[in-house]
Amino acid sequence: MKLKTNVKNCKGCGICVEFCPKKVLELDEVGKIKVAREADCIKCGQCELRCPDYAIFVMRDKK
Amino acid sequence: MEELLVKYFRPKLPHIWCPGCGNGIVTASVVKAIDKLQLDQDKTAIVSGIGCSSRASGYLNFDTLHTAHGRAIPFATGIKLVKPDHNVIVLTGDGDATAIGGNHFIHAARRNINLTVVVFNNSIYGMTGGQYSPLTPHRGMATTAPFGNVDRPFDLCELAKGAGATFVARATTYHANLLADLIAKAIEHKGFALVEAITACPVSFGRQNKMGTPANMIKWQRDNAVMVEAMAKMKPEQLEGKFPIGVLHQAEGTEYVTEYQKVIKRAMGSGE
Ligand SMILES: Cc1ncc(C[n+]2csc(CCOP(=O)(O)OP(=O)(O)O)c2C)c(N)n1
Ligand code: SF4
Ligand code: SF4
Ligand code: SF4
Ligand SMILES: [Mg+2]
């Protein structure tokens, strides 16, 4: 698992969707965060850095 | 961020801010700065005034004070005088810090008291319905300026510098990591330190000024903020509408609490 979301805290602002360079993220039918193409995620951290609601996290690599 | 939430936030999320509001990004940068410096949570006070941005203190697990509109700096001054070894961080809005609290702001800068003041500048009174503030751009739209703002805004960083602040910096929520670094530098600085955080209020300022989605407002920050070092090398025509970010001013100066302790010693007859 590369990403973890906290849907309860997501307000559907779309910032993460817009800034994801790999188009991994979408908003679902009720406007909440949905990881649509996790395989494409390059773990760049843009979504986590920019989410104003602390609702998406990039999982750390296990050493 | 997940570990930072556990360590530094009270279990009160989600916060009250609107979808896409930049306040959450600024607050995260404050916490990242605190974590970077490994500040003692029991020796760190966070003080705010009134406004959307000033709600930040309530989410943070430190000694926090949510005070009256415009009065965060006076409360912070009191804490710093009584507990000089504590880190005192003020989180305030553009209205809170420069309108009703404008005098407190300039005089705290003049005194060079060792506080860290983070101004969440969204160019508007967000909480009360989008009235213009002293930082609303000339001709910007606000509910109290339906034909565009007649006033000219303060340049907050120049104001702080002119008033005597010894550390002055600016960043935006697009530059969230830079913002955290600057806040950390401001906390480390001994003297009055201002960090102006340019942040989006999509629901009021953004809507009234047709700035588009929250993501578009962050892109506006990306496209118009220029590192101060790079700015020096740019031609005047390239600078149209741009504003500098980074450390804008740093100086040494006698600090208020240190001076106050000296006067207490003198008054007690124990010399310098
Ligand atoms: C003494 C007093 N006057 C006016 C108000 C109403 N008031 C509450 S917040 C606010 C302005 C907030 O603007 P700003 O500081 O920019 O914060 P923002 O909501 O934009 O984050 C005003 C005028 C008040 N609460 N107390
Ligand atoms: S880590 Fe980067 S690539 Fe992965 S979802 Fe977030 S923004 Fe997209
Ligand atoms: S940035 Fe955060 S709040 Fe906004 S849509 Fe993405 S996960 Fe939700
Ligand atoms: S009104 Fe503006 S500043 Fe206040 S929470 Fe909403 S978006 Fe943020
Ligand atoms: Mg404001």
Image: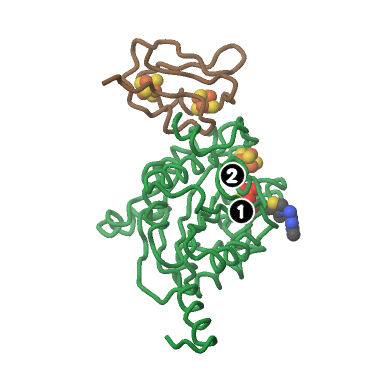
* Same chain assignment for discs 2 and 1: yes
Classed neighbour count for the residue bearing mark 1: other residues with Cα under 10 Å, few (<14), some (14–19), many (≥20): many
Tell me the shade of chain A.
brown
**Relative to B112, residue B227 above or below:** above
The answer to whether the residues at label 2 and label 1 have Cβ atoms under 8 Å apart is yes
Toward which corner of the image does residue B236 lie, by quadrant?
bottom left
Which part of the image, by quadrant, shows the C terminus of chain A?
A: top left
Give how far across and how far down residue B70 sits, in percent.
Answer: 65, 60
Question: Does residue A52 lie above or below B70 as drawn?
Answer: above
At horizontal 30% and vertical 56% (from top left) the residue drawn is B231
Query: Where residue B252 sits in the image (x, y, percent)?
Result: 35, 72
Depth check, front residue: B175 or B108 = B108
Residue located 51% across and 89% down the image: B269
Would you place residue B272 above or below residue B87 in this image? below
| Vertical order, A13 against B223 (above or below) | above
- Residue B147 seen in the figure: no
Instruction: Report the chain holding disc 1.
Output: B
Chain B visual colour: green
Dot 2 amino acid type = Ala
Residue that carries the numbered disc 2 in the rendered image: B56
Q: Amino acid at mark 1?
A: Ser
Is residue B254 in view? yes
Q: In the rendering, which numbered label is found on residue B48? A: 1
**Rendered image coloring scheme:** by chain
Please give left or right for residue B157 compared with residue B129 in the image. left
Secondary structure, mark 2, is helix
Give the structural element (helix, strand or loop) at label 1. Answer: strand
- Label drawn at residue A27: none
* Residue B62 position within the rendered picture, expressed as x and y whole percent measured from the top left: 55, 46
